[in-house]
Image: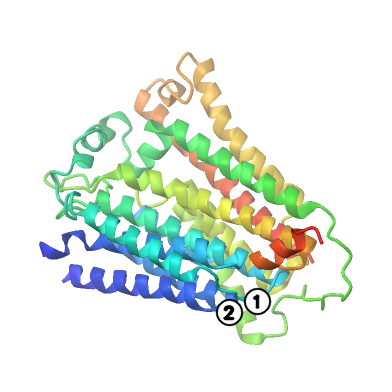
């Protein structure tokens, strides 16, 4: 039964992707892209990836859509297409699809327990995590402890991208010939979104905090929580207007969050070295190595959550404040 | 069942190339970035497809259920971080597009190209 549902969702996914590419109205394309992300999140959930589904739903359907809309407001809503070389492009794409599909027949079928990907380190992670780290969510354990170097790198990529956006959009804009109509008051004059949205904001932020602190036991962790809290705060900014949002959390505080979160992660790593272990080795943080691992994971997940939330909010404000 | 064992990978291939088509055939810069997002999501789908084990569940250890099969956590970790990095890099691309619009007054590839030609 579930496979019928999966095939249905995947077919919808392809149809949505075609619609995104075909439509000439960019606003419609961005909205369809949000639907594409939600369908993708549902697919991830069917494929047992609860953590990834949570992230895709918050980031793909939430934050990405808002950032695209912010960019559309600064550029153009309609595509003025001039299609040249369309036949050649279609030919290249069609041939590549056929080659890729031919290549998939060498891949193990979906769910094959004998597939090579399940033979290497994954069984070790699943067997050893309860003993070595003592937390149920293996995804969090791999993310924060076994592959902590990777995650540190990813946090710094987010940090660098955030700095790049702030540099690009922080420069004074060129003088505008026609002044843009002031649209900073948010949705204050629309009663229904205002009331419903205001009710939702605290619960979204609360859920984000739950995902942050429950990430060791259920699906969740810093990346998901940072994205969910950022969507809640962005909803607040859309309802109350840009100014009210900056009054609530000033820009400086957001920058502090990005820098502080990344530094907290690095600091935990260095702390492990000072206590006689390796960089990002949490076992030495407590006399009981399992407890030490747990303290380390909680600390770096907090760092990730703070950095991701700050980065996404800074990026949002960079687009929203430019006119 | 056996026939549909590769369906996820076929959808991966098709979605990947739909995104790629938008990047190479569409002249609008925002449309190109949307295509790149689809391309990226297709790669995510391929990785997550590989993590599934038949009869398995999400890799959250349940004490007291000794014979439970768990799906592979490793692809999930890789994609989890990639999604958040993906939105940051997309935002960086959009910031570049906004600056191009301010400088050239257009986000259509052919108009930007014409503006760059010495007249």
- Outermost residue to the front: B119
Q: Chain of mark 2?
A: A
| Quadrant in the rendering for residue A9 | bottom left
Residue at position x 45%, y 46% in the image: B81
Chain letter of mark 1 equals A
Secondary structure of residue under mark 2: loop
Label 1 sits on a secondary structure element that is loop
Determine contact: label 1, label 2, CB under 8 Å: yes
What percent of the width, then of the height, locates residue A174? 86, 61
Could one spot residue A83 in this view of the protein?
A: yes
- Which residue bears the numbered disc 2? A25
> Residue B52: x and y, percent?
23, 52
Left-right relation of A275 to A117: right
Question: Eyeballing the image, is A190 above or below B68?
Answer: below
Colour mapping used in the image: rainbow
| Residue at screen point 54% across, 16% down | A274
Specify the quadrant that holds the C terminus of chain A: bottom right
Q: Along the horizontal axis of the image, is A313 left or right of A248?
A: left
């Amino acid at each position: 039964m579930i496979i019928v549902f999966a095939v249905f969702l995947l077919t919808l996914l392809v149809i949505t992707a075609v619609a995104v590419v075909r439509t000439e109205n960019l606003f419609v394309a961005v909205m369809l892209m949000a639907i594409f992300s939600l369908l993708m999140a549902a697919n991830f959930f069917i494929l047992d990836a609860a953590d990834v589904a949570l992230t895709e739903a918050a980031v793909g359907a939430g934050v990405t859509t808002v950032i695209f809309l912010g960019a559309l407001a600064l550029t153009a809503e309609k595509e003025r297409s001039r299609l040249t070389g369309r036949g050649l492009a279609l030919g290249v794409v069609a041939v590549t699809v056929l080659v890729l599909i031919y290549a998939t027949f060498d891949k193990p079928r979906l769910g094959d327990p004998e597939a090579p990907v399940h033979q290497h380190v994954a069984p070790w992670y699943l067997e050893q995590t309860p003993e070595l780290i003592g937390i149920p969510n293996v995804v969090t354990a791999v993310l924060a402890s076994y592959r902590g170097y990777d995650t540190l790198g990813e946090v710094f990529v987010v940090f660098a991208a955030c700095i790049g956006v702030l540099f690009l959009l922080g420069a004074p804009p060129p003088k505008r010939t026609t002044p843009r109509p002031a649209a900073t008051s948010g949705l204050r004059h629309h009663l229904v979104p205002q009331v419903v949205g205001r009710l939702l904001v605290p619960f979204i932020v609360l859920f984000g905090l739950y995902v942050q602190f429950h990430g060791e036991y259920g699906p969740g962790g810093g990346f998901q929580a940072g994205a969910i809290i950022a969507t809640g705060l962005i909803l607040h900014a859309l309802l109350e207007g840009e100014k009210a949002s900056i009054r609530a959390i000033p820009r400086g505080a957001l920058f502090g969050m990005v820098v502080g979160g990344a530094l907290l992660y690095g600091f935990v790593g260095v702390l492990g070295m000072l206590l006689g272990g390796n960089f990002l080795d949490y076992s030495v943080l407590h006399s009981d190595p399992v407890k030490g691992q747990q303290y380390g994971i909680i600390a770096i997940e907090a760092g990730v959550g703070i950095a991701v939330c700050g980065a996404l909010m800074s990026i949002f404000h960079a687009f929203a404040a430019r006119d | 069942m056996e026939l549909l064992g590769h369906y996820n990978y076929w959808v991966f291939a098709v979605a990947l190339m739909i995104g790629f088509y938008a990047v190479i055939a569409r002249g609008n810069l925002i449309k190109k970035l949307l295509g790149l997002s689809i391309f990226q999501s297709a790669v995510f789908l391929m990785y997550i497809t590989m993590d599934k084990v038949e009869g398995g569940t999400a890799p959250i250890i349940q004490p007291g259920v000794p014979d439970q099969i768990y799906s592979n956590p490793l692809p999930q970790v890789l994609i989890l971080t990639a999604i958040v990095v993906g939105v940051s890099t997309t935002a960086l691309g959009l910031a570049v597009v906004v600056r191009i619009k301010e400088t050239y007054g257009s986000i259509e590839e052919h108009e930007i190209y014409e503006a760059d030609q010495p007249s």
